[in-house]
Amino acid sequence: MKYILENDKLKVVVATKGAELQGIYSKVTDKEYMWQPGAEIWNTHSILLFPNPGRIAHDRTVIGGKVYPATMHGFAKDMEFTAEEASSEKLVLTLAANEDTKFFLPYEFLFRVIFELNGDVLEQRFEVVNKDNKDIYFCLGAHPGFYCPIELGESGDDYVLRFDPPQQLLRDEAEAGTRLLTGKHTPYELENGTDMFVGEKFFNDDPKLFSNVKADTITLLSKKSGRFVEMGIKDFPFMCLWGVPDKMQILSIEPWCGTSDLTDTDHVWEHKLGIEKAEVGGTWVRTLTFRVG
């Protein structure tokens, strides 16, 4: 099922399957900014990565001394969420622990994804509510894809990714084939500490994984037309940038809390790189924002 959120600035489409954000249309610019399937590039718009973004070594993890299956990018993207609240400018979707989730993650939880329009800003809030009698562990990430170039007639060479405030990013090395992290990383230089040049062949060296992300916002910006997508990413310490090689067509900006496994992982879930925790009786919260123009 799909829901539409709408005000005088934006029209947003969200699907209950996977709590997937499927469209961000600006009434001001008369443009859709989110990737719409139609070419043989990516057959979705965005996916929600819970309880893990990235790769899991051997597709298995150990929780409470027991081995559980754990697949790339987690299970939430394939689950049907329930609409707890729906109005013209706010949508609350929930996924409660059940037999299907416990096949992968043996915790009692309520996962809530809240979409809300505030003027020209779309807010997407994530809440993991601990319903268990013990602390629960998880990771979370977003994987929205955007048109790049935004404006027809432009190219990837006209675009930068701009971080605010200035960053000292580390690019994390991934093992060829498995894409697991080796634990090695190198500083990634940004112009003025803020700007990452995109270019047509940005993804010819595979996706880019970063740690030490301390940005409040990241903006996909055309230096030619001024078209932009700004994402608020505060408290998301990891990031993946994904697209296709040879010619820039889609750019996915993926803020993550948590990341892929290390090649030398001990597989214990609680030891996972970047693992997050919701304490007994507590609620873990993170928020993304989207602004387009």
Image (cartoon, rainbow, N blue to C red):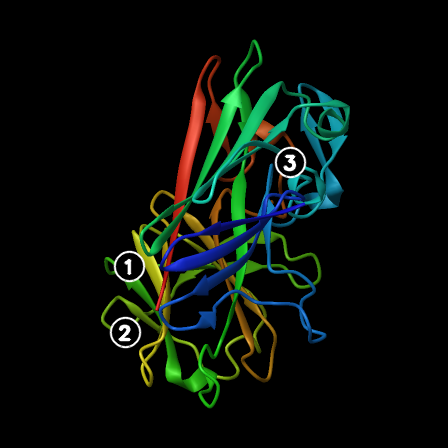
Q: Is residue 115 visible?
A: no
User: Circle 1 is placed at which residue position?
Assistant: 167
Task: Determine the residue positioned at 49% across, 76% down.
Answer: 148
Q: Secondary structure at mark 2?
A: loop
Q: Earlier in the sequence, mark 2 or mark 1?
A: 1
Q: How many circles with numbers are drawn on the protein?
A: 3
Looking at the picture, tell me which residue is in the foreground, 124 or 278: 124
Badge 1 crowding class, 10 Å Cα cut-off, few under 14, some 14 to 19, many 20 or more, is: some
In the rendered image, the residue lying farthest to the top is: 133
Q: Earlier in the sequence, mark 1 or mark 3?
A: 3
Badge 2 crowding class, 10 Å Cα cut-off, few under 14, some 14 to 19, many 20 or more, is: few
Q: Is residue 20 left or right of residue 184?
A: right
User: Circle 3 is placed at which residue position?
Assistant: 81
Tag 1 and tag 3, C-beta contact below 8 Å? no
Tag 2 and tag 1, C-beta contact below 8 Å? no
Looking at the picture, tell me which residue is in the foreground, 121 or 71: 121
